[in-house]
Image (cartoon, grey):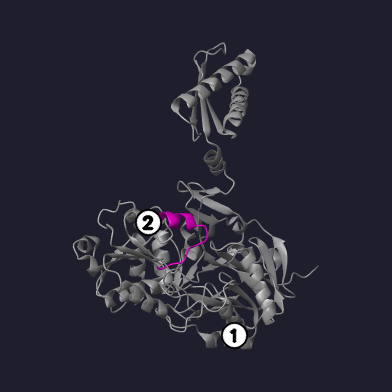
Amino acid sequence: MKKHKDELVFLPLGGSNEIGMNLNLYGFGPEDNRQWILVDVGVTFGDLTTPGIEVIVPDPKFLEGETILGVVLTHAHEDHIGALGWLWDKIKAPLYATPFTAFLIREKLREAGVDDFDLTEVPLGGSIKIGPFEIDYITITHSIPEPNGLAIRTPLGTVLHTGDWKIDPDPITGKATDISAITKLGDDGVLAMICDSTNVFVEGASGSEAGVRDALAALIRTLKGKVAVACFASNVARMDSVIRAAEACGRRVCLVGRSMHRMTAAAKHVGLLGGISEFVTEGEASKMKPTEVLYLCTGSQGEPRAALSRIADGNHPLVKLKSGDACVFSSRVIPGNEISIRSLQNRLSDLGVEIHTEKDHPGIHVSGHPARDELRQMYEWARPRIAVPTHGERRHLQKHAALAAEIGVPEQITPRNGDMVRLAPGLAEIIDEVPAGRLFVDGGMLVPEGADALRERRHAAHNGMLFCSFALDRKNKLASIVEVRGLGLAFEDDDTISDQLENMCDLVEKALQKLSPEERDDDVTVETTVARVLKKAAQNIWDRRPIVETIILRL
């Protein structure tokens, strides 16, 4: 009989060919008996192409029936831990995370109604053993506390999984990158490096958070009214910079937005944000002089339900901004959010609020991901045999692979979600393709990406809807007038739309009369006939084919 050989495979189910929604798998063993660990279980967010959808999670269908030994979390960003609550019933495996991330995971799972879970809190720089995988946590720097790279040791070689990272020689929170640990890995031999590709098109380095604090303080010092600063709540280093810059300018800080309070609680739990004044409440801030307060707000990406949008719309009960006040955006524009951010800034401008961004004030934001010089440095430290770019769109992955080849990495491979890569033994290659889709959180339920509800919602958003209703008696004859109503269809005035709809009613009535009594007895035939007539009429009037909903009342 043929002997089944052990293999080490890497399988992304999210985060490759996209930025966000990270779900990476490592498998070890023979093809028919692999054991798996998961690294990160994150979300991405809806956009204009997904009407009504705010949260999207990776589809874990492949994991059904597989042996999952554990879930290892690199850090606490939503695109790395945000799907745990939604997918818990499909995973249910031991969790491993450092203290800050563990604090937020406990809260996230309990919010999802999950009380029975096994979570091991791993110390910074600690090690764990999960079946054939021995994993060392390696301290790196990023835009959130306790970011970790993972040295995943197996009998077939060591993989360095970087997670999200940058090289910050002077981090505000936590320690600097553990260069000695990475170079030691390189000395011992790194089989493959699975590495962040977000800023591969950016030359140079991403910059240090320490410079942001100075730039923010210099800007805030020039502002005379109330000041609001918008940033990612998860960027605790940026929160620290804003708070200390505010205090240096004689302002007290008021947190606005639930995420700000949640993240500060997590940060204080692990000893961060020390040596700062107590925050003032929204009620206290409303009674202070404008020059004495700074609002630290969620909503830098224009999220409609976030604190800053409510302030811009005048809907926040206690926080009001007006002419002479200022709003500072200390964050980057995530691709896809340009329209919502522009709308938010315009609404603030309508209130007379002065807008300040990194375009006007370089230095008030730096990225948490490595630019090209930092990528080169990481490859020089780790010296992997195989480069596997991840955390990027297709163009990012290919550009990253080209950079690795230029540096002298012997092998490069750029998998898409669902591509199973054999890392060892032998040359790296894609050996299988497995299901790797998306699930949408819709009305508190997980629905497939191609579900009818979202397809119909998209169709309605682009083409509108027509509703047609009438009654048929026991002999299947019309027993009422035909009513047609439209939704989301353009018209010049009420008389015009009334004439158009009345004409549609006549067309439907004539089409029904042409059907035999037997045909009118079949709802499907009747609905098909009505839809065909109304769609043709709508095509002639609006050059659109709307959704048609037919309501038949049978007497």
Q: Which mark is residue 352?
A: none
Residue 191, image quadrant: bottom right
Can residue 190 be found in the magenta stretch? no
Q: Residue at x 55, y 22 (%)?
A: 504
Residue 26, image quadrant: bottom right
Q: Calculate the distance from the C-alpha at mark 1 to the C-alpha at mark 2.
A: 41 Å
Where disc 2 sits, the SS reads loop
Q: What x and y, as percent, mark residue 155?
A: 65, 79
Can residue 334 be found in the magenta stretch? yes
Question: Vertical placement of 138 versus 478: above or below?
Answer: below
Q: Residues within 10 Å of mark 1 (few under 14, many from 20)?
A: some
Give the residue type at disc 2.
Ala
Q: What x and y, as percent, mark residue 514?
A: 64, 15
Q: What x and y, as percent, mark residue 112?
A: 42, 56
Q: Residues within 10 Å of mark 2 (few under 14, many from 20)?
A: some
Q: Residue furthest top?
A: 475
Q: Earlier in the sequence, mark 1 or mark 2?
A: 2
Residue 296, image quadrant: bottom left
Q: Nearer the viewer, residue 8 or 389?
A: 389
* Relative side of 501 to 408, left or right: left
Q: Can residue 443 be seen at all in this image of the molecule?
A: yes
Question: Vertical placement of 479 versus 92: above or below?
Answer: above
Q: Which mark is residue 306?
A: 2
Give the residue type at disc 1.
Trp
Q: Can residue 115 be seen at all in this image of the molecule?
A: no
Determine which residue is flagged by label 1.
381
Q: What x and y, as percent, mark residue 252?
A: 25, 70
Marks 1, 2: nearer the viewer: 2
Q: Nearer the viewer, residue 286 or 66?
A: 286
